[in-house]
Image (tube, rainbow, N blue to C red):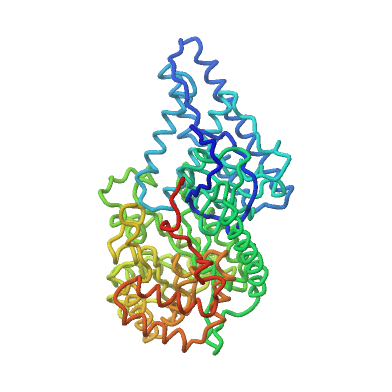
């Protein structure tokens, strides 16, 4: 039951698009639909199958219209998401199996659809990798869309909105987001969703400030409520008091001023005041992100995740599928280089049609390079495509989760075999293409001096390195507070890797989330990293901080940090240091991240 009071309330979610928006709420009904279940007589089966197929066709029509709208608005970048959903509407596992379920079980369309959706969800539920697991939402979006069409609830309310509002909904599909007109929908808040959900990607692509995963949003918010949506911290304030409104208006003013100032850093080199040069690169998952990479002044792609090529398919991608994707990336980013990482899946369930055994602990099981070395034929297809793409620009090849010298030697043996095959076939490639490994397990750190002799560069994957070093399951809410990038052990590990690499004369990049966090920039500079690869939205801010320090200052900060005992002590030291240079961004009144202690949700 919704509260009638206008008392100020705080809701915490995940900020996915930076920006602070103040406006009126519009509660959109996108709650979960309960699918009716009934047994039907045999003579009704053809009619029921036709009803289901009509709903699928209507769903396709809606998605095509949403895609056309994006194209008309020259927002072609995120249309690939709608293409993925259109592809799902052709998926045999979902569509044809649902028809078969209707025929064989004599049940209505809604029930048959629910059975097959649940089966697909189970496959994704057992994936350990957070990004791949989040792709389950695409199945949910498609299922919901077909269901709405089946039940006559497919009318879109978003296009009919005539005034500026902040949409609040249980969930929104990427197609819903595509329907939004930026001059009417100034922001949105959803109960569901994660940082890597397709709705979040759409919000970033369309630059609509948004908070997702705000689980209680539709419970506490009514249409007409005044909202503050902070897409930076993920905080939503409902009916703010005059004091809080004043504070956020000031934050908004500072933020807008900061964004105008940050744009000037786009074409400036990532260089400290005393001339220490660092490369700032972008992490991407899709070809369509390249225009944004260039607009934000990245000096190349530091991490191109290729897992997306394997998602939402009936079968494995062909060599040509791989090649076309890599060629577009390589040509799109030229004359800069693209670091292409080979397949890094998080669990066997993802490639379910290969009928691999279930694992008790997929994060430590057959994943990343271990999978590629077991499934050599699949690995070779990807290597051939990457080598072929190297003839069209600058490519560096990156292998994930290397834990020992034996693995990288085996990888190089396979790579050389592929090279010989291509040469024999007269297919061009770059014979000097650099190869590197991700340092993301403790064993790789300990023998970094040995591994450095085997490759041309290192890339530190902090997400996994922190997880494995501190024994923290990142998706386990009970222990996520222990996931601490500034843990003394992590800083020492990074320092050790950099020293081993530089002693061997090779460069070291960092491509985990830590690289794009402004708070960590002085520490990473002082640790002597050569390259930082991050989400494009972090680039301007990281450059600004980087250009405000001297290399000597950063070295001193690291030296002092390594004498401290706890992550808290190190963060206090770093934050105090940043506060002196950026009082507006790191001062007491403008903390970059609100902590849970600063408010009580719903009160």
Nearest the camera: 295 or 43?
A: 295
Residue 18 in which image quadrant: bottom right
Q: Residue at x 47, y 26 (%)?
A: 34
Residue 294 position within the rendered picture, expressed as x and y whole percent measured from the top left: 63, 67
Front-lying residue, 223 or 154: 223
Q: Position of residue 151 (x, y in %)?
A: 56, 23
Q: Estimate the x, y position of residue 430 in percent, counting from the top left.
A: 52, 72
> Visible in this render: residue 419?
no
Q: Residue furthest left?
A: 360
Taking 22 as reference, is 579 above or below it? below
Look at the image and tell me whether residue 50 can be seen.
yes
Where residue 380 sits, quadrant-wise, is: bottom left
Q: Residue at x 64, y 53 (%)?
A: 206
211 sits to left or right of 502: right
56 up-or-down from 601: above or below: above
Q: Position of residue 406 (x, y in %)?
A: 28, 70
Count of labels shown? 0
Nearer to me, 255 or 434? 255
């Amino acid at each position: 039951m919704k509260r009638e009071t206008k008392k100020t309330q705080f809701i915490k979610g995940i900020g996915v698009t930076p920006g602070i928006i103040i406006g009126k709420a519009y509660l959109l009904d996108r709650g979960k639909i309960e699918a009716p279940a009934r047994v039907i007589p045999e003579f009704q089966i053809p009619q029921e199958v036709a009803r289901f197929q009509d709903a699928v066709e209507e769903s396709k029509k809606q998605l095509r219209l949403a895609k056309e709208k994006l194209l008309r608005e020259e927002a072609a970048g995120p249309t690939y998401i709608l293409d993925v959903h259109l592809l799902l509407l052709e998926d045999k596992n979902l569509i044809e199996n649902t028809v078969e379920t209707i025929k064989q079980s004599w049940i209505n369309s809604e029930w048959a659809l629910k059975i097959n959706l649940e089966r697909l969800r189970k496959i994704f539920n057992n994936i350990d990798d957070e990004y791949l697991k989040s792709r389950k939402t695409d199945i949910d979006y498609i299922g919901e869309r077909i269901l709405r069409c089946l039940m006559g609830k497919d009318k879109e309310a978003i296009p009919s909105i005539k005034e500026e509002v902040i949409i609040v909904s249980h969930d929104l599909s990427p197609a819903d987001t595509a329907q939004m007109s930026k001059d009417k929908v100034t922001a949105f808040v959803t109960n569901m969703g994660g940082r890597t959900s397709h709705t979040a990607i759409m919000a970033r692509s369309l630059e609509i400030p948004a908070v997702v995963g705000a689980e209680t949003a539709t419970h506490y918010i009514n249409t007409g409520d005044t909202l503050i949506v902070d897409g930076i911290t993920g905080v939503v304030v409902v009916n703010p008091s005059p004091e809080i409104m004043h504070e956020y208006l000031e934050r908004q003013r500072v933020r807008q001023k900061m964004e105008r100032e940050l744009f000037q850093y786009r074409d400036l080199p990532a260089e400290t005041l005393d001339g220490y040069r660092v490369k700032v690169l972008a992490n991407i998952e899709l070809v369509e992100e390249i225009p944004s990479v260039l607009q934000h002044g990245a000096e190349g792609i530091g991490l191109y995740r290729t897992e997306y090529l394997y998602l939402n398919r009936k079968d494995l991608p062909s060599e040509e599928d791989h090649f076309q994707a890599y060629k577009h990336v390589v040509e799109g980013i030229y004359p800069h280089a693209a670091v292409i990482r080979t397949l890094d899946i998080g669990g066997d369930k993802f490639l379910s049609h290969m009928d691999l055994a279930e694992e008790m602990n997929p994060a430590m099981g057959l994943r990343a390079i271990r999978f590629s070395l077991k499934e050599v034929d699949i690995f070779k297809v990807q290597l051939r495509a990457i080598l072929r793409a190297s003839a069209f620009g600058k490519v560096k090849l990156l292998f994930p989760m290397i834990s020992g010298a034996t693995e990288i030697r085996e990888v190089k043996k396979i790579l050389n075999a592929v090279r010989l095959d291509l040469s024999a076939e007269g297919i061009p490639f770059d014979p000097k293409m650099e190869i590197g490994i991700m340092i993301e397990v403790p064993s790789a750190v300990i023998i970094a001096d040995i591994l450095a002799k085997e490759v041309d560069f290192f890339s530190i994957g902090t997400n996994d390195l922190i997880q494995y070093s501190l024994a923290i399951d990142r998706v386990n809410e009970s222990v996520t507070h222990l996931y601490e990038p500034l843990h003394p052990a992590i800083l020492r590990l990074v320092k050790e890797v950099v020293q081993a690499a530089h002693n061997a004369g090779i460069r070291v990049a960092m491509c985990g989330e830590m690289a794009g966090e402004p708070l960590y920039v002085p520490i990473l500079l002082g640790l002597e990293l050569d390259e930082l690869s991050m989400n494009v939205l972090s680039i301007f801010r990281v450059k600004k901080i980087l250009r405000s320090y001297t290399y000597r200052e950063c070295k001193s900060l690291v030296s002092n940090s390594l004498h401290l005992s706890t992550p808290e002590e190190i963060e206090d030291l770093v934050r105090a240091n940043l506060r002196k240079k950026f009082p507006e961004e790191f001062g007491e009144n403008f903390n970059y991240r609100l902590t849970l202690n600063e408010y009580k949700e719903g009160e």
